[in-house]
Image: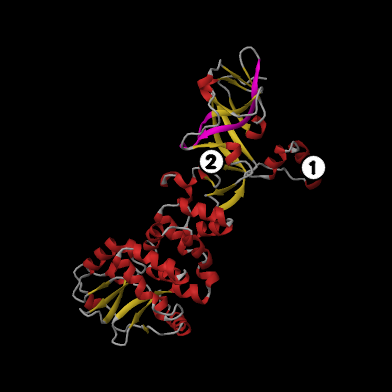
């Protein structure tokens, strides 16, 4: 039975595939093998039909504009040769069956990898839109023709209604798209995930898909995710990149995280990346690489705020506003003299409560708890436990500040399952 032109009807891809395409004379032109969707919109429209001609095996593409009626069979207006290019896709287009059905996708709302069992489409007027991905067991039963039987069995045996499990397309990131590596930042929904969730997803994928997904991310997102990823996987991901691309990502990482990663890479690969990095960033990382990774020098970051004692609260807050994006520590500000001898520490809370013109020398706490470069992780952990600090400064033998250890960095060493 044909669907009325103005009706709004939900359809499943599994019900559409294999459908007949006929012309006005009711002559069979072929059968639907796939649908083409433009992936640029929130609810992407179907832009074409791939079908296998009745007289051949090579798939042809039918423009959606040629569809007159879409129901139990597809009625199309007369075709000519230019209407039937062989298997061509334009940039940003997907083949639903080929790219999605039975493939892995990321549910960016639930932050997990799922398998696509069917696709839910909405027919509205003469247009067809992709609206949901079906990842439920019921969708799988529909695919193999057992949906009604499964419904009856679950109702009878378990007194349970077997429900659909749909994910709105706006929360779906395909992982088998041929255009995955060419997605614009705004179209790559993986960038919406929390870095820790994205790292978990990357770790779940097989080695080839893992690399493909990682390389599809913008530099900032890739750096954030890499910091949360298991060190062994970090190495594999970076080894698959050329030095220029790798250096762009590593420059966005915390200096301490970058040093840990480069220290795990083969020497030749690490040196190649350091040569591509900006000079200042490379020098910071090289300075950290000389220290053992489980001692204070290897745990510290060099991205922290320092100011002289005569600076005011207003100047300190302005520094934090300007540099916050590049700092690993913002909850403490360290006060030093011209030779970077550590004089005191000011908490962010104290800065916010102080009058704007108050000098740091008048509000700093000179009783700074610090550690030396060669301090072991066990002693550092004791200090964090005793004082409840969020960060502890590292000083040399002359009391010059060299870096700051955050609690997170310590946790990644003493309890890696919690730190990452």
Is 6 placed left or right of 288 in the picture?
right
Whether residue 125 can be seen here: no
**Along the line of sight, the residue nearer the viewer: 196 or 333:** 196
What x and y, as percent, mark residue 249? 40, 59
- Disc on res. 169: 2
Report the residue that reaches farthest toward the top: 25
Mark nearer the N terminus (1 vs 2):
1
Local secondary structure at mark 1? helix
The quarter holding residue 275 reads bottom left
Please report the bounds of the magenta region as a residue range. Answer: 27-47
Q: Identify which residue is drawn at 72% across, 40% down.
A: 141
Q: Residue furthest front?
A: 268
Residue 210 visible, this angle: yes
Which quadrant is home to the N terminus?
Answer: top right
Task: Measuring from the top left, give residue 120's x and y in whole percent.
Answer: 60, 36
Vertical order, 93 against 269 (above or below) = above
Residue 128 image offset from top left, x and y in percent: 55, 28
Q: Which mark is residue 153?
A: 1
In magenta stretch: residue 31: yes
Q: Nearer the viewer, mark 1 or mark 2?
A: 2
């Amino acid at each position: 039975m044909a669907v009325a032109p103005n009706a709004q009807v939900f359809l499943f891809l599994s019900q559409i595939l294999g459908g007949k395409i006929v012309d006005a004379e009711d002559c069979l032109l072929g059968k639907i093998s796939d649908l083409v969707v433009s992936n640029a919109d929130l609810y992407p429209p179907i832009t074409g039909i791939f079908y296998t001609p009745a007289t051949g095996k090579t798939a042809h593409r039918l423009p959606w504009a040629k569809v007159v009626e879409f129901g139990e069979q597809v009625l199309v207006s007369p075709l000519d040769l230019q209407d039937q290019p062989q298997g061509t896709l334009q940039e940003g287009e997907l083949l639903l069956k080929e790219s999605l059905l039975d493939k892995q996708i990321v549910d960016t709302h639930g932050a997990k990898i799922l398998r696509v069992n069917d696709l839910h489409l909405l027919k509205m007027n003469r247009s067809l839109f992709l609206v949901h991905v079906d990842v439920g067991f019921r969708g799988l039963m529909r695919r193999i023709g057992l949906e009604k039987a499964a419904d009856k069995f679950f109702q009878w045996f378990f007194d349970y209604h077997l429900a659909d499990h749909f994910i709105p397309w706006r929360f779906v990131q395909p992982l088998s798209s041929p255009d995955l590596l060419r997605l614009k930042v705004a179209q790559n929904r993986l960038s919406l995930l929390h870095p820790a969730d994205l790292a978990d997803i990357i770790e779940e994928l097989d080695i080839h898909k893992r690399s493909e997904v990682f390389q599809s991310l913008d530099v900032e997102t890739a750096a954030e995710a890499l910091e949360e990823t298991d060190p062994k996987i970090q190495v594999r991901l970076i080894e698959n990149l050329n030095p220029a691309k790798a250096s762009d990502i590593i420059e966005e990482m915390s200096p301490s995280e970058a040093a840990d990663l480069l220290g795990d890479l083969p020497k030749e690969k690490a040196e190649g990346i350091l040569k591509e990095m900006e000079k200042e960033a490379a020098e910071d990382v090289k300075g950290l690489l000389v220290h053992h990774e489980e001692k204070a020098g290897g745990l510290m970051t060099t991205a922290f705020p320092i100011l002289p004692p005569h600076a005011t609260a207003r100047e300190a807050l302005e520094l934090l506003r300007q540099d916050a994006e590049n700092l690993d520590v913002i909850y403490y500000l360290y006060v030093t003299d011209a030779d970077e001898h550590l004089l005191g520490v000011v908490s962010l809370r104290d800065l916010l409560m102080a009058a704007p013109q108050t000098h740091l020398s008048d509000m700093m706490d000179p009783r700074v708890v610090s550690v030396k470069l060669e301090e072991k992780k066990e002693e550092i952990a004791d200090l964090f436990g005793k004082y409840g600090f969020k960060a502890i400064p590292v000083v040399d033998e002359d009391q010059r500040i060299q870096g700051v250890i955050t609690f997170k960095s310590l946790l990644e060493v003493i309890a890696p399952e919690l730190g990452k």
